[in-house]
């Protein structure tokens, strides 16, 4: 089993980034690679709370992990430390043994000049999931997460 580790700087304070990690509407926007759309089936953002999400390719001939064009996964929130950490366990819903197994995704937030540094880690990638492809998808998602958190700040300026 392999892992992916990505760091990203967000021009928003930790509470805004933490909120974007746990808000279902925000997750639907940022946790989706280019060329896919997201559907949230279930999302209970609390320790022990479950989630289930499908990502569907926009192009007709794409190969999904779960079905012809879709990757569906489920999991739960294993650890939540307000404004500091989110840890999830995740599994693909698939019959393919190369894609089965529980993975762990963690997001650690730290203050950084101008905002928040996110360290995102995806552990226990199954053999059928390329670490390189996973890193590309992770970077796309973190870029979108940053945009969501930064837009929220722009829409809700702090009082002077």
Image (tube, rainbow, N blue to C red):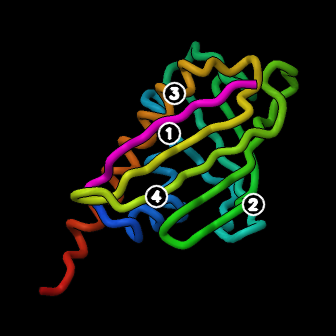
Q: Which residues are magenta?
A: 1-11
Q: Residue at x 45, y 27 (%)?
A: 35
The residues bearing labels 4 and 3 have C-alpha atoms spaced at a distance of 18 Å
**Closer to the N terminus: mark 3 or mark 2?**
2
The residue at which mark 1 appears reads as 32
Q: Is residue 155 left or right of residue 76?
A: left
Q: Residue at x 41, y 61 (%)?
A: 17
The residues bearing labels 4 and 2 have C-alpha atoms spaced at a distance of 22 Å
Residue 5's disc number = none
* Image quarter (top left, top right, bottom left or bottom right) of the C terminus: bottom left
The residues bearing labels 4 and 1 have C-alpha atoms spaced at a distance of 20 Å
The residues bearing labels 1 and 2 have C-alpha atoms spaced at a distance of 18 Å
**Closer to the N terminus: mark 4 or mark 1?**
1
The residue at which mark 3 appears reads as 135
**Closer to the N terminus: mark 1 or mark 3?**
1
Crowd tier of the residue under label 3, counting other residues whose Cα lies within 10 Å: few below 14, some 14–19, many 20 or above: some
The residue at which mark 4 appears reads as 109
Residue 50's disc number = 2
The residues bearing labels 3 and 2 have C-alpha atoms spaced at a distance of 24 Å
Q: Are marks 4 and 3 in contact (CB under 8 Å)?
A: no
**Closer to the N terminus: mark 4 or mark 2?**
2
In the rendered image, is residue 147 in sight?
yes
Q: Nearer the viewer, mark 4 or mark 1?
A: 4
The residues bearing labels 1 and 3 have C-alpha atoms spaced at a distance of 13 Å
Residue at the top extreme of this rendering: 61
Position of 25 relative to 63 (above/below): below
């Amino acid at each position: 089993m392999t892992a992916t580790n990505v760091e990203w700087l967000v021009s928003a304070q930790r509470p805004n980034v933490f909120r974007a990690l746990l808000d279902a509407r925000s997750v639907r926007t940022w946790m989706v690679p280019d060329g896919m759309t997201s559907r949230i089936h279930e999302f209970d953002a609390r320790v022990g709370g479950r989630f289930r999400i499908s990502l569907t390719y926009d192009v007709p001939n794409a190969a999904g992990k779960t079905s012809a064009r879709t990757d569906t996964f489920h999991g739960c929130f294993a650890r939540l430390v307000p404004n500091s950490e989110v840890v999830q366990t995740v599994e693909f819903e698939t019959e393919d043994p190369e894609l089965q197994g529980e993975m762990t995704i963690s997001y650690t937030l730290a203050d950084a000049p101008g905002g928040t540094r996110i360290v995102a880690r995806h552990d226990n990638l199954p053999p059928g999931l390329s670490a390189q492809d996973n890193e590309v998808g992770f970077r796309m998602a973190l870029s979108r997460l940053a945009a969501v958190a930064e837009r929220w700040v722009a829409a809700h300026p702090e009082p002077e």
